[in-house]
Image (spheres, rainbow, N blue to C red):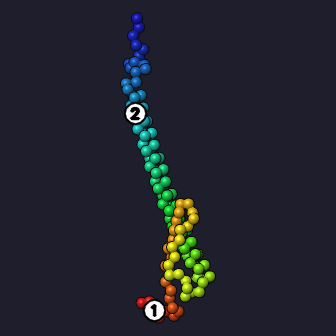
Amino acid sequence: MTGPTRGKYGRRLGDDGGFTMIAAVLISVAVFILGAAIIQIAVSNSTASGNDRRRLQAVDAAEAGVDYYLSQLQSVALSSAPCSVTKTLGTTPASSFTVTPTFYTHPPAHPPS
């Protein structure tokens, strides 16, 4: 009957003393941390993208309002131009604008101070 095989320094071959388990746990923790970081970055990018999309929609609606009111001024007499206009754009998602112009006399009656 032979005993366990021993290596050069007296340890039994194949006995890693739990090192494999510790290494596996450390690798699992590292993978978990990387996964959590990737998810956080993806959520942050998604939020930034949504904010950018809403900002662009607001700018587009504002430009549509200015364009609409300018076309109204060109097609009707200034005295009959509407004081305020609210429209809903036929876009998806729906956007709307309200235009309330301020008319000045030329030269201004009271120059700004």
Q: Position of residue 41 (x, y in %)?
A: 47, 51
Quadrant position of the C terminus in the picture: bottom left
Front residue (pair 81, 41): 81
Q: Name the residue under label 1.
A: 111
Q: Position of residue 91 (x, y in %)?
A: 57, 63
Q: Position of residue 82 (x, y in %)?
A: 53, 81
Residue 59 shows up from this direction: no
Q: Mark 2 points at which residue?
A: 25
Q: Of circles 1 and 2, which is in front?
A: 1
Relative to residue 14, is residue 77 depicted above or below?
Answer: below
Front residue (pair 89, 49): 89
Relative to residue 111, is residue 70 depicted above or below?
Answer: above
Q: Residues within 10 Å of mark 2 (few under 14, many from 20)?
A: few
Instruction: Name the residue rendered at 40%, 24% in the picture.
Output: 16
Identified by mark 1, the residue type is Pro
Q: Where is residue 62 in the image (x, y as percent from the top left)?
A: 53, 71
Instruction: Name the residue rendered at 51%, 91% in the picture.
Output: 105
Instruction: Name the residue rendered at 40%, 33% in the picture.
Output: 25
Question: Of helix, strand and loop, which one carries label 1?
Answer: loop
CA separation in Å, label 1 and label 2: 75 Å
Quadrant position of the N terminus in the picture: top left
Identified by mark 2, the residue type is Val
Say whether residue 66 is left or right of residue 110.
right
Residue 105 shows up from this direction: yes
Say whether residue 94 is left or right of residue 31.
right
Front residue (pair 73, 25): 73
Question: Of helix, strand and loop, which one carries label 2?
Answer: helix
- Residue most extreme to the right: 75
Relative to residue 99, is residue 17 depicted above or below?
Answer: above
